[in-house]
């Protein structure tokens, strides 16, 4: 054989590790694969059927054997058959697929939330405890994890083939996806939405750890400042507390326990306060004015990075009293700009803590 | 008597002295022609030119993907190449391929008219196409564009510093050529049918083109608007798609796919028309369930407009919107299934021969079936999450567009080549080309389904090494496929001079186009025919033949 040894080596390696689906490392993966197998089988049957019809008729009715064609108009019965059977099968796939879709995109309420910010060309993960990662994601197994995604520039797409989940990270809005990893190990993380020059370099690893290893990892990688703490600092340094301080004469609404509540807007319609709403209210405040307040809040668009917004959102989510807001109100002006704590290995942690966009 | 009847008419045939090619001479007589047949030939030459440009770019993509590293070219170059491959193949080859060449040539003849309704608009459409093509080439030569053919915002509006504006305007201009072609077909089919040519006597080729024309006329303007908005956003920052100005990048996705999904049907429907004609002719039998096939084209056109958001299942559109669009997507798959089975049953009790057009048509049916069924994998929202944006998508649409449409185009070009040029193509080598194309195609694109299942993302200049073996298969297949595409261009040009003389009706087909001389007169018919026979009426044809022979005798 004239095949070069290199190609041989590849072929052998490929056949040894032959697979047509990636490892099933999440709870949803076997369910998705079941539908994939079903659809593959139906497709094979359909393809074989069409192939048999074509070859069978070609042999039976070739001109040598069948010199004169018999003219046939058609057959309503047959046509109804091959309308209804495919339609039925497609509808089964539709229902089955939709059930899976709702499962993949409806996070359970007890899911642990991790923020992921996409940018050209890296993934930045922000854990609530203040761990920052780039192009890698550490998660514990057997625990539902929700990812809240956003992009700070173009569309990206966060894909973990081994978990069978994928979600676009879109500029200007949060999207979510969740999964429950089952098998500890290291899996591919891809950006699958074309995002420019280094699109194929925007890859990383998802490390699924056992709960004990995960605790070790958490302790070893924290930057020392949790997202909420960082948010509190930003809240003060951006002077949010000048208005949102919960005092009776405050010019802005109190933010304690606002997360998850229904706010009445000046338009007269109520709105549910979730992450997306909080983000919008910070960056584009004039779009939603709470009833009873004047539209005086300036926009923070362009003055605060996506990580900064995430910290603020995380802070407001966990804010249950205005006590500390009022405490800091009188002292922040005197505090010097706090230097970044050395976060060890992740430089993005520093940028996130400051909340100011990088050039 | 019977010996005379069985003589194929090309044995005694000669190229008619007066025909649309010899009618006038000189370059200007071609460049300023209003004759739909000459315009079709102009289109044929230009789209072939762009096909080979797009094909060369595809070759470069496959070469780069031979190894996991991005070593043949920088990733920027790779991005520009796949963008240009997509733009050229979709807007400058697939969209005009069958309609602007075969459709232009045949629709007036098939319905018994002397030309299209608006000959000058038809010529204008070719010039617009050329202008669009020239602008695209200019964009490519002066640095290229790297947004992908989908022009996703804000990539295209804010983050790419390549020739987005030139390319966008090129597609805008080429879009008008498509609108004009569609408009011409709709008016012609409505108003210029010969006496007796009722709607249900129209060849299925015309039905398919009619459906595709509606999509062109209603869909293309939306693409034009969208591209103008991209250009305006890029130049003066109007902020329609920019979230920091209150715009919404998802809006771009809606607008873009509102055209670009129907565009898939613009590309495939005319190909389906070709397959109906070819299968019927080489089985000597009317198409099984004519009405079902005709209305399935219309159904595809109608449903095709309401499935666009299935390109956005993972983009954060509402879960309930996903339900609706997933359901509609399943519905649009049904008419395609109907067509496949109707074609298969057209063979039943036929009298089948296996000339090149028929082989390509068989290739179409096999590959389109795979392409269609894998579309269902993507239409089901739960599996779409895993498969979308991977090589599964790439394989799926290449099975439909290349395995489907390109096979149909080649089938049609071979089928009507005798009519267009008056000469036969060489049969044996072209059958070989059809088989080589089929094998090469499967080798190239089938491994990509597996790659997609494994999760390899599309548009990657470099990829993890475990995907290499399948990529090597794919690249090897692409080289076979390349041979399959080069063969026809060589022997078809050869046949212009050395091919056997075809005669009026070498296939003994029933369409009106086969009842006139090859190549046709400029005015197609010396007198407008009065259509009494049914569509695909092989008994009428037999009778006609016998009648002619007795008449001569």
Image: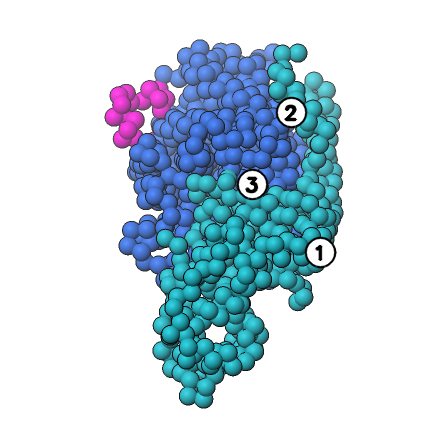
Q: Which residue is drawn at 42% across and 88% down?
A: A249
Q: Mark 2 points at which residue?
A: A10
**Residues at discs 3 and 2 in contact (Cβ within 8 Å):** no
In contact (CB < 8 Å): disc 1 and disc 2: no
Q: Residue at 69% of width from left, 52% of height from top?
A: A213
> How many residues crowd around disc 2 within 10 Å: few (fewer than 14), some, or many (20 or more)?
some
Q: Does the magenta stretch include residue A222?
A: no
Image colour for chain A is cyan
Marked residue chain, label 2: A
Which of these two is toward me, A267 or B546?
Answer: A267
Task: Name the front one of labels 1 and 2.
Answer: 1
* Residue beneath disc 1: A211
Q: Give the range drawn in magenta.
A: B18-35
Residue nearest the observer in this picture, B219 or B472: B472
- Tag of residue B457: 3
For the residues marked 1 and 3, what is the alpha-carbon distance in whole angstroms? Answer: 30 Å
**Residue at 41% across, 28% down:** B53
Q: Is disc 2 placed on a helix, strand or loop?
A: helix
């Amino acid at each position: 054989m004239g095949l070069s040894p290199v190609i041989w080596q590849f072929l052998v390696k490929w056949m040894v590790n032959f697979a047509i689906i990636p490892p099933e490392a999440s709870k949803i993966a076997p369910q998705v694969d079941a539908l994939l197998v079903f659809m593959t089988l139906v497709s094979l049957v359909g393809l074989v059927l069409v192939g048999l019809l074509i070859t069978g008729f070609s042999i039976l009715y070739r001109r040598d054997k069948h010199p004169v064609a018999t003219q046939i108009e058609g057959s309503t019965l047959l046509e109804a058959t091959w309308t209804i059977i495919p339609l039925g099968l497609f509808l089964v796939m539709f229902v089955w697929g939709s059930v899976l879709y709702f499962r993949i995109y409806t996070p359970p309420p007890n899911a642990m939330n991790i923020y992921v910010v996409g940018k050209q060309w890296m993934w930045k993960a922000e854990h609530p405890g203040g761990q920052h990662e780039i192009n890698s994601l550490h998660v514990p197994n057997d625990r539902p994890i929700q990812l809240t995604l956003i992009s700070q520039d173009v569309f990206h797409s966060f894909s973990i083939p081994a978990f069978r989940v994928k979600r676009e990270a879109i500029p200007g809005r949060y999207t979510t996806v969740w999964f429950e990893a089952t098998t500890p190990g290291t899996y591919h993380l891809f950006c699958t939405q074309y995002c420019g020059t280094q699109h194929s370099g925007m890859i990383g690893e998802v490390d699924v750890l056992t709960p004990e290893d995960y605790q070790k990892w958490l302790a070893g990688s924290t930057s020392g400042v949790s997202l909420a703490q960082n948010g509190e600092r930003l809240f003060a340094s951006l002077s949010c507390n000048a208005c949102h301080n919960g005092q009776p004469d405050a010019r802005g609404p109190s933010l304690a326990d606002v997360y998850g509540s229904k706010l009445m807007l000046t338009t007269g319609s109520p709105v549910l306060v979730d992450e997306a709403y909080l983000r919008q209210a910070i960056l584009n405040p004039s779009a939603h004015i709470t009833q009873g307040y004047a539209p005086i809040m300036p926009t923070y668009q362009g003055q605060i990075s996506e990580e900064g917004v995430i910290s603020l959102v995380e802070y407001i989510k966990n804010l249950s009293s205005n006590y500390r807001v009022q405490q800091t109100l009188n002292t922040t002006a005197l505090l010097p700009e706090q230097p970044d704590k050395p976060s060890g290995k992740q430089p993005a942690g520093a940028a996130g803590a400051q909340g100011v966009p990088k050039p | 008597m019977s010996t005379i009847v069985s003589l194929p008419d090309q044995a005694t045939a000669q190229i008619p002295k007066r025909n649309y090619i010899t009618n006038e001479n000189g370059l200007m007589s071609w460049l300023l022609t209003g004759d739909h047949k000459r315009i079709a030939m102009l289109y044929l030459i230009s789209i072939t030119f762009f096909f080979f440009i797009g094909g060369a770019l595809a070759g470069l993509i496959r070469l780069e993907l031979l190894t996991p590293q991005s070593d043949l070219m920088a990733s920027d170059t790779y991005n520009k190449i796949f963008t240009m491959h997509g733009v050229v193949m979709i807007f400058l080859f697939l969209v005009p391929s069958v309609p602007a060449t075969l459709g232009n040539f045949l629709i007036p003849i098939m319905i018994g008219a002397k030309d299209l309704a608006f000959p000058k608009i038809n010529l204008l459409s070719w010039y617009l196409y050329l202008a669009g093509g020239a602008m695209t080439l200019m964009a490519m030569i002066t640095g290229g564009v790297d947004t992908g053919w989908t022009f996703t915002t804000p990539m295209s509006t804010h983050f790419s510093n390549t020739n987005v504006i030139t390319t966008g305007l090129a597609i805008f201009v080429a879009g008008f050529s498509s609108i004009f072609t569609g408009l011409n077909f709709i008016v012609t089919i409505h108003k210029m049918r010969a006496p007796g040519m009722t709607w249900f006597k129209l060849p299925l080729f015309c039905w398919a083109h009619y459906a595709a024309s509606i999509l062109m006329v209603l869909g293309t303007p939306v693409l034009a608007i969208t591209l103008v908005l991209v250009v305006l956003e890029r130049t003066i920052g109007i902020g329609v798609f920019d979230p920091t100005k209150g715009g919404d990048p998802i809006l771009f996705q809606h607008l873009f796919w509102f055209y670009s999904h129907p565009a898939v049907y613009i590309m495939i429907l005319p190909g389906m028309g070709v397959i109906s004609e070819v299968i019927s002719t080489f089985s000597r039998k009317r198409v099984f369930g004519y009405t079902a096939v005709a209305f399935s084209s219309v159904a595809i056109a109608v449903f095709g407009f309401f499935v666009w958001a299935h390109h956005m299942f993972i983009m954060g559109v509402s879960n309930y919107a996903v339900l609706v669009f997933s359901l509609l997507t399943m519905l649009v798959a049904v008419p395609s299934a109907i067509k496949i089975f109707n074609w298969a049953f057209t063979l039943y009790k036929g009298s089948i021969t296996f000339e090149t057009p028929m082989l390509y048509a068989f290739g179409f049916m096999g590959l389109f079936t795979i392409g269609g069924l894998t579309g269902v994998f993507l239409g089901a929202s739960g599996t779409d999450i895993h498969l979308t944006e991977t090589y599964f998508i790439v394989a799926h649409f290449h099975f439909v567009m290349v395995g489907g449409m390109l096979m149909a185009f080649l089938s049609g070009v071979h089928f009507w080549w005798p009519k267009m040029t008056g000469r036969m193509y060489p049969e044996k080598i072209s059958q070989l080309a059809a088989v080589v194309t089929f094998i090469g195609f499967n080798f190239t694109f089938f491994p990509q389904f597996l790659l997609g299942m494994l999760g390899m993302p599309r548009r990657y200049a470099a990829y993890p090494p475990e995907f290499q073996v399948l990529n090597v298969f794919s690249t090897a297949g692409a080289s076979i496929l390349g041979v399959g595409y080069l063969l026809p261009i060589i022997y078809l040009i050869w046949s212009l001079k050395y091919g056997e003389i075809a005669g009026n009706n070498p296939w003994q087909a029933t369409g009106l186009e086969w009842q006139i001389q090859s190549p046709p007169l400029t005015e197609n018919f010396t007198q407008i025919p009065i259509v009494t026979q049914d569509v695909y009426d092989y008994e009428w044809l037999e009778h006609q033949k016998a009648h002619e022979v007795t008449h001569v005798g």
